């Protein structure tokens, strides 16, 4: 938490403005509460410091010291305190939103630019939604609730100081009651933190189910599994909402129970027929001071409970800050030299507790040649593609480019993958092709021509500006695959990896696209990851991955 606070103080100048306003609010709180002392009749003949200060101020304002003057000053000071308190609240909320915005952008940037693919494959989508959403939001609210808690506690302490100056017996009784209340609320807050940790896990599970169902909606409906998905999500939300209800009930109890006990004690002390040593006016003034104490502590309890639950919900706030401060990876410059040779030497890879996927794998990929990597599911074909792409670091072994003369990190700017199901975004056809690349319309149409999509685009009313729907549903499966290949060609790759990227094409279109790719990439390297024996037959070499993780080369064709 200290590292988090240092990070906030070092990056957001608004923190210091909020702290300055907090000091002024506390001073106004003390001034307003201390006016209860001159308003009590018992103080008329006394000559304490508080009375002397207020009398001097009244005379300076050419006002007659008296109840009317003290009441007017109380109203004016309290109005200023409320106004500045509102400004402070807004400033604190603004600070929390700035922190949320910054952290959410930084975490999303880390996920997209630097998160290891091995972690991406093993973590749920709910984990990342929570990390960039809920966790960063709660990191912003932590600052706001921390400041609100501090203000509440300090305001209560200010009122306690005034109460001590007003009446020692009332001060002692109030402190004893507060100690008992702190012990009781501490037990409640421990239960809140435990329940909040459970609620966080439930939230991640529900988020994962929601996204997975949305992305698989066609499959769910085709399998008549709608009811199953609805029931699963409804049960997860039911458990999550029930946990939130319990948390809110306990948090409010932590604030309400002490106040109820105090009111019952007050009702007993003020019951008809009881005798009190204090005058009614003095009792009234003391009650106002005590009410200010408990109102401030109620605010502190509410914000403090929120602070503890938010801090507990974030699994590792230090890791969150570390990710936010992480320097973004340098933009990968295009390699100066062409990629003539890719070599894998005794490469091994493992996904944590899933065991080894690749073990002792060696291979050579030379420019001007086309390769087909074949083998049964689960032997590491796609993992091999990730290693060549530089998306996954091998557990052991090395990947060399041009016999080690070119770093893989630099070379990967010219290595492009096309997946079996290309990700289509709900934007224009042009933007789906470019995705940040720099290419004119002629280059886009040339790439589309290579995959036999140029004629389709020319028939569209808006051409390249045609907007694609969610997941590209206004295109067929084969058209989406060809769009994915064209997107790769726009980047002028020297190594093109196609992971089952032609599986949805009819045989004639598949052969035509493969021949066009070979012609366009005749100076580069094409690697097909495939189960299709026809595709394998079109390659120069077939490399067979086997269950024993051995790589066998059938040689040039």
Image (cartoon, helix red, strand yellow):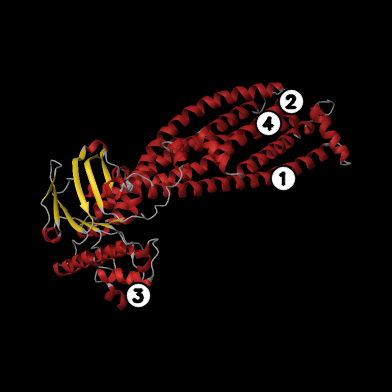
34 lies left or right of 450: right
Q: Whole-percent x and y of residue 321?
A: 47, 39
Residue behind mark 1: 79
Q: Which residue is mark 3?
A: 463
Q: Residues within 10 Å of mark 1 (few under 14, many from 20)?
A: some
Cα–Cα gap, marks 1 and 2: 23 Å
Please give the name of the residue rendered at 34% of the width and 69% of the height, measured from the top-left corner. Answer: 444
Label 2 Cα neighbours within 10 Å, binned few <14 / some 14-19 / many ≥20: some
Which of pointers 4 and 1 lies earlier in the amino acid sequence? 1
Q: Is disc 4 surrounded by few (<14), some (14 to 19) or many (20+) residues within 10 Å? A: many
| Number of the label disc, if any, that sits on residue 158 | 4
Residue contact at pointers 4 and 1, CB within 8 angstroms: no
Residue 252 showing in the rendered view: no
Q: In the structure shown, which secondary structural element does the residue marked by tag 2 occupy?
A: helix
Mark 2 or 3, closer to the camera: 3
CA gap, disc 3 and disc 4? 70 Å
Mark 3 and mark 4 lie on one chain; the one further toward the N terminus is: 4
Spatial CA distance of label 1 from label 3 is 63 Å
Residue position marked by numbered label 2 in the rendering: 165
């Amino acid at each position: 938490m200290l590292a988090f606070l240092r990070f906030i103080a070092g990056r957001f100048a608004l923190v210091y403005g909020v702290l300055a306003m907090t000091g002024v609010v506390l001073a106004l709180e003390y001034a307003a509460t201390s006016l209860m002392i001159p308003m009590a009749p018992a103080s008329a003949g006394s000559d304490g410091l508080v009375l002397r200060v207020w009398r001097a101020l009244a005379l300076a304002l050419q006002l007659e010291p008296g109840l009317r003057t003290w009441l007017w000053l109380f109203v004016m000071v309290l109005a200023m305190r409320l106004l500045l308190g509102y400004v402070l609240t807004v400033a604190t909320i603004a600070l929390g939103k700035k922190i949320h915005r910054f952290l959410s952008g930084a975490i999303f940037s880390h996920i997209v630019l630097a998160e290891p693919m091995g972690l991406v494959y093993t973590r749920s989508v709910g984990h990342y939604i929570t990390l960039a959403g809920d966790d960063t939001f709660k990191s912003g609210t932590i600052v706001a609730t921390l400041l609100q808690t501090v203000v509440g506690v300090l305001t209560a302490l200010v009122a306690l100081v005034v109460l001590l100056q007003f009446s020692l017996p009332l001060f002692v009784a109030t402190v004893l009651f507060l100690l008992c209340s702190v012990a009781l609320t501490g037990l409640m807050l421990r239960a809140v933190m435990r329940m909040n940790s459970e609620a966080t896990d439930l939230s991640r599970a529900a988020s994962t189910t929601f996204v997975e169902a949305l992305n698989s909606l066609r499959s769910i409906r085709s399998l008549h599994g709608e009811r199953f998905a609805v029931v699963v999500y409804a049960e997860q939300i039911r458990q999550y909402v029930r946990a939130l209800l319990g948390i809110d009930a306990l948090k409010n109890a932590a604030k309400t129970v002490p106040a109820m006990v105090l009111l019952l004690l007050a009702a007993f002390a003020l019951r008809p027929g009881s005798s009190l040593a204090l005058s009614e006016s003095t009792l009234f003034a003391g009650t106002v001071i005590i009410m200010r104490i408990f109102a401030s502590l109620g605010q502190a309890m509410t914000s403090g409970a929120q602070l503890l639950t938010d801090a507990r919900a974030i699994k590792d706030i230090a890791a969150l800050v570390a990710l936010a401060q992480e320097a973004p990876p340098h933009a990968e410059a295009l390699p100066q030299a062409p990629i003539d040779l890719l070599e894998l030497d005794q490469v091994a890879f493992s996904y944590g507790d899933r065991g080894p996927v690749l073990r002792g794998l060696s291979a050579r990929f030379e420019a001007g040649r086309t390769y087909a990597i074949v083998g049964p599911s689960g032997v590491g074909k796609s993992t091999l593609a990730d290693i060549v792409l530089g998306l996954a670091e091998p557990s052991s072994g090395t990947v060399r480019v041009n016999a080690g003369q070119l770093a893989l990190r630099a070379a990967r700017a010219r290595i492009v993958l096309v997946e079996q199901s290309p990700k289509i975004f709900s934007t224009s056809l042009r933007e789906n092709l470019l995705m940040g690349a720099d290419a004119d319309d002629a280059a886009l149409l040339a790439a589309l021509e290579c995959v036999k999509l140029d004629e389709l685009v020319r028939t569209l009313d808006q051409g390249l500006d045609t907007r694609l729907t969610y997941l590209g549903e206004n295109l067929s499966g084969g058209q989406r695959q060809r769009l994915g290949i064209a997107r790769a060609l726009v980047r002028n790759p020297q190594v093109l990896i196609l992971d089952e990227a032609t599986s949805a094409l009819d045989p004639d279109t598949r052969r035509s696209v493969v021949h066009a790719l070979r012609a366009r990439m005749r100076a580069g390297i094409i690697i097909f990851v495939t189960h299709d024996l026809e595709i394998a037959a079109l390659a120069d070499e077939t490399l067979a991955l086997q269950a024993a993780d051995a790589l066998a080369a059938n040689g040039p064709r």
